[in-house]
Amino acid sequence: MQFTLSELWGHMGLFARLIVVVLGLMSLASLGVTLERALFFSKSKSDSIRYAQSVEKMLANGRLNDVAAKKAGDTGGYLGRVVDAGIKAYGRAEGAHGEYIVESVGRALERQAQREIQTLKRGQSVVATVSSTAPFVGLLGTVMGIVNSFQAMASSGSGGLGTVSAGIAEALITTAFGLLVAIPAVMAFNWLQTWVDARAVDLAESSNELLDTIARAVGAEHIPREVKVNPRLDVNSPTARSGEVGAE
């Protein structure tokens, strides 16, 4: 038996072929989500950087009305939409007590930041599911292949390694396919999660800087709260995250 794709496929039974097809679909789903997220991340980060550069001097000088006039929309990225939400909350609360304005803006920033984080995490559940279940799908094919091998040995009435070696080799192939699908999916999931964690830090820092600016503008004595963003809502991720997230 040669270890080529055509030879492996030819020696597989119906159940093993079904397992390979399922693993192939899982791999395509994981790859598709990863590529789509990579493109989305690249565009969102570029839009956010351009927006930050366009409003940096305005915020530094406390020109909040000029920032409000510069609508973020779909071209401001995740950062622009969060800042825009805070500026709108500032406009709605204008004229109120300074502490209330800062508190209202803080809540608006936090809500929008959480929405942006969930948008960035879209599709990660697919990659996580593939990375955690693909080895077990392959193992199912292996178990059934070994069962078929022993059934063939029982029906032939002869034992020995030569009788079952071909069946066991076929069975182990499905495990190999499962690992080939799972390993890239685990790597992709870790990269996606790390990227989202880094952007959560960016959003939290930018939101708190905006709160500082608004507090100075309204004359608040102190900022009663900080915007905190926790992107790790999925505690059942297939891999443990180690180390600190660095900005990309």
Image (cartoon, rainbow, N blue to C red):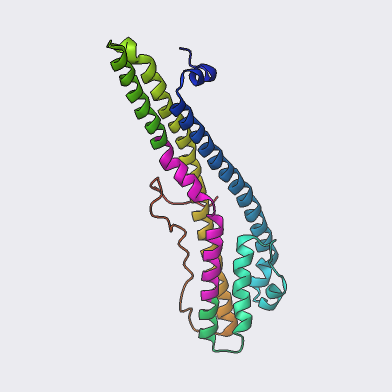
Report x, y in % for residue 68.
Answer: 68, 75
Let me know if residue 127 is in the magenta part. Answer: yes
Give the answer, above or below, for where 8 lies relative to 91: above
Which quarter of the figure has residue 155?
Answer: top left
Determine if residue 205 is in view.
Answer: no
Q: Nearer the viewer, residue 100 or 221?
A: 100
Q: Nearer the viewer, residue 137 or 47?
A: 137
Give the answer, above or below, for where 164 lies relative to 50: above
Which residue is rendered at x = 34% and y = 17% of the image?
A: 152
Report x, y in % for residue 132.
Answer: 41, 42
Q: How many marks?
A: 0
Which residue is rendered at x = 43% and y = 51% of the image?
A: 244
Report x, y in % for residue 106.
Answer: 52, 75
Report x, y in % for residue 61.
Answer: 66, 74
What residue range appears in magenta?
A: 106-135
Which residue is rendered at x = 46% and y = 46% of the image?
A: 128
Residue sitting at the far front = 155
